[in-house]
Image (cartoon, rainbow, N blue to C red):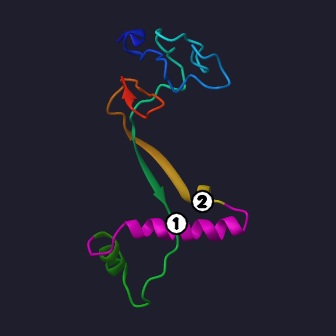
Amino acid sequence: MNKENILPLVLSDDDGIRPAGKPDECLYCKQKVGKAHKYNCVILQRKVKVRYSYEIEIEVPWFWTEDDIDFHRNESSWCCDNSIDELLSLRTKLNAEGKCLCALFNCEVIEIPDMKPFRKNNKEEIVP
């Protein structure tokens, strides 16, 4: 695949055109409006699928078994959105101690579904 043939053009409302740079070129790759962004321009994005995992302590009824906990968190009416509240609460506690959640997290790339680059313009429209 010829990378240069699929690179999006720098547009007049391109997100790469920044107040700190020239009004007719991408601040990051220095390409002029109407030219393709360079291959390594940070404005170019692609979709990837990742898996975030984390380990935290939670409170559960004393008598629950591992199976009870697994069922409650994976198969019952418990909503996974609640885990976000647990993380926010933990973040607040850790931040008060001068710490963050980084030591608890892991990110793993699962899949790269499409190698086609895109960029977003200032209106947040995806432009191929």
**Helix, strand or loop under label 1:** helix
Give the quadrant of the C terminus: top left
C-alpha span from label 2 to label 1: 8 Å
- Image position, residue 98 (x, y; %): 73, 63
Q: Is residue 58 in the magenta section? A: no
**Helix, strand or loop under label 2:** helix
Give the quadrant of the N terminus: top left
**Above-or-below relation of 100 to 25:** below
Point 48% across, 81% down: residue: 59
Residue labelled with disc 2:
101
Residue type for callout 1:
Leu
Residue type for callout 2:
Leu
Q: Residues within 10 Å of mark 1 (few under 14, many from 20)?
A: some
Question: Would residue 13 appear left or right of 67 to someone viewing this image?
Answer: right
Residue labelled with disc 1:
87
Assess whether mark 1 and mark 2 are in contact (beta carbons under 8 angstroms).
Answer: yes
- Image position, residue 126 (x, y; %): 38, 30
Residue 15, labelled with which disc?
none
**Quadrant of the rendered image containing residue 2:** top left
**Above-or-below relation of 51 to 89:** above
Q: Is residue 88 in the magenta section? A: yes
**Quadrant of the rendered image containing residue 50:** top left
Point 43% across, 35% down: residue: 124
Report the front residue among 50 and 127. 127
Question: Would residue 90 appear left or right of 70 to someone viewing this image?
Answer: right
Question: Would residue 34 appear left or right of 94 to someone viewing this image?
Answer: left
Per the picture, the main secondary structure of the magenta-coloured stretch is helix
**Above-or-below relation of 58 to 120:** below
- Image position, residue 17 (x, y; %): 57, 22
Point 68% across, 24% down: residue: 20
Question: What are the residue bounds of the magenta stretch?
Answer: 75-99
